[in-house]
Amino acid sequence: MSSTMIDGVTGIGDTVSGDPAHRPLKLDDPATVMSITEVTASPDAAAVHARLREEWGDVAPVGLEPGTRAWLVTEYRTIVAMARGQFPLATATGTWNGHEQLGPDENSPLLRPLAPVSRPTVEQAEAGVHGRLRTPLDEVLGVIDDAEVAKTTRDRCEELIDSFAATGVADLVREYVAPMPHLTLGALLGFDAATAKQVFEIATRPASERYAAATVHEVSFLLNGQTAARRPDGTPTPAGRLARHAAYESTAEAALGIVSLTATAALGLQAWLAQTLYLSLTDEQFARRLAGGRLGIDEALDEVLWSAPPVSSLAPRIAVEDFLLDGKLVQSGDAMLLAVGALGSDPSIRGEGPWDGSGSGAHLAFGVGAHACPAPHLARLIVRTAAETLHRRLTPALALRADELRWAPDFRFRLLEALPVAFRPEQDSALEGTS
């Protein structure tokens, strides 16, 4: 290892001192560190990020599962530089040094994003391979009609609401938020309901199973099916166009593209919609401004990305060589978590007011650089339509205290485990209107 480390942001060489008292901090040096679940599952993640900055600066060591750690990066400029490839980092997770630890359960929800995969996925592929695998997604998603997206989303949401509107109670996560992306994305890609269910079940499997040869073969078979490949009028579906895109070298690569897209997109849509509904139910100021029309729905969705970020961290990066950053020695094999969910409390880009930055795209929830989300406008349209449809049909109220809500253990997305609500059953309103 060289005695000179390079700070990837400033580009200034810094010599590592021979004095142990002045050596930079290594990931395993602290006897104890905060668990990542204390950050991502906290009711007040912004306060936790602030405490981490106070203790460690902009790069903090955090624990994953017992025996495994990662660096959590909370500063805007550094995150952008890392996402744009200005640091010696890789998106492929096979070289993560946590795999060498004794007993880590790679099927743990916290470790799934770091699990090695045997086939190049869109998220983990590097350079030229990534560009080739990404091109079909950009092209196919880019031509999906916005009007079709809005209508499909609204129709699927109406069907979901119909299933519980007469009861007066619902768990919006289980009955609305969780199934909505599956039904909507499946229909937009051209799958029938049964095929969409199969694809999304596959996409939620652990990475070791999701990208196994048998699973890829299973999705390839579905893509080659007539209902997935063509519409009733004979025109190709988006899934059919993906399966036959010239950039793919095989149907298996198209299958990987579909699985990667659905796995990440579904979680992102669920998290953004759930956080939007959560904020409307728990933040009176947000609810008043939204209901009063002083904020349009798009501005409200941007405020969610700042104040209740649905994305906690971008896909993890792995250091491919040693470098010095913020007084820490990042070693080859260390995992870097790019905490875009911390940017709402980053004093370098946010003001003092709770609404400062509303409408700004600097939240980085969709990523930046080559691995950014391929269709953020479609995600926004789907979430906007789903939120509008629910609030047009019902006036839900939270059925328990806000501090009783819990978030799932996941360092990438802030996913509520449940969102129970009560409301006036629709059938009562309909009967009163005819009396």
Image (cartoon, helix red, strand yellow):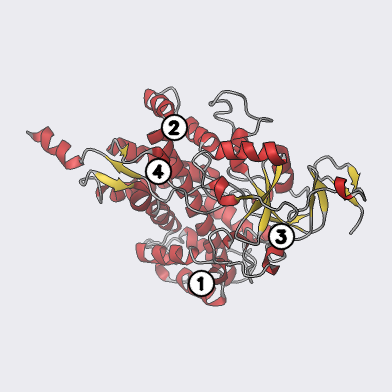
- Residues packed near mark 1 inside 10 Å, few (<14), some (14 to 19) or many (20 plus): many
Report the residue marked by disc 2: 297
- Residues packed near mark 3 inside 10 Å, few (<14), some (14 to 19) or many (20 plus): some
What is the CA distance from the residue labelled 3 to the residue labelled 4?
A: 42 Å
Instruction: Name which residue type carries label 3.
Output: Glu
Work out whether residue 80 can be spotted. Answer: no
Image quadrant where one finds the C terminus: top left
Can you give x and y, in whole percent of width and height, for residue 398 in the image? 33, 39
Report the residue marked by disc 4: 404
N-terminal of the two: label 2 or label 3?
A: 3
Work out whether residue 207 can be spotted. Answer: yes
> Helix, strand or loop at disc 1?
helix
What is the CA distance from the residue labelled 4 to the residue labelled 1?
A: 43 Å
Can you give x and y, in whole percent of width and height, for residue 393 in the image? 28, 38
Residue 220, numbered label: 1
Report the residue marked by disc 3: 126
- Residues packed near mark 2 inside 10 Å, few (<14), some (14 to 19) or many (20 plus): some
> Helix, strand or loop at disc 4?
helix
> Helix, strand or loop at disc 2?
helix
Instruction: Name which residue type carries label 4.
Output: Glu
Dividing the picture into quadrants, the one containing residue 396 is: top left
Q: In this figure, what is the number of numbered marks? A: 4
N-terminal of the two: label 4 or label 1?
A: 1
Residue at position x 49%, y 63% from top?
203
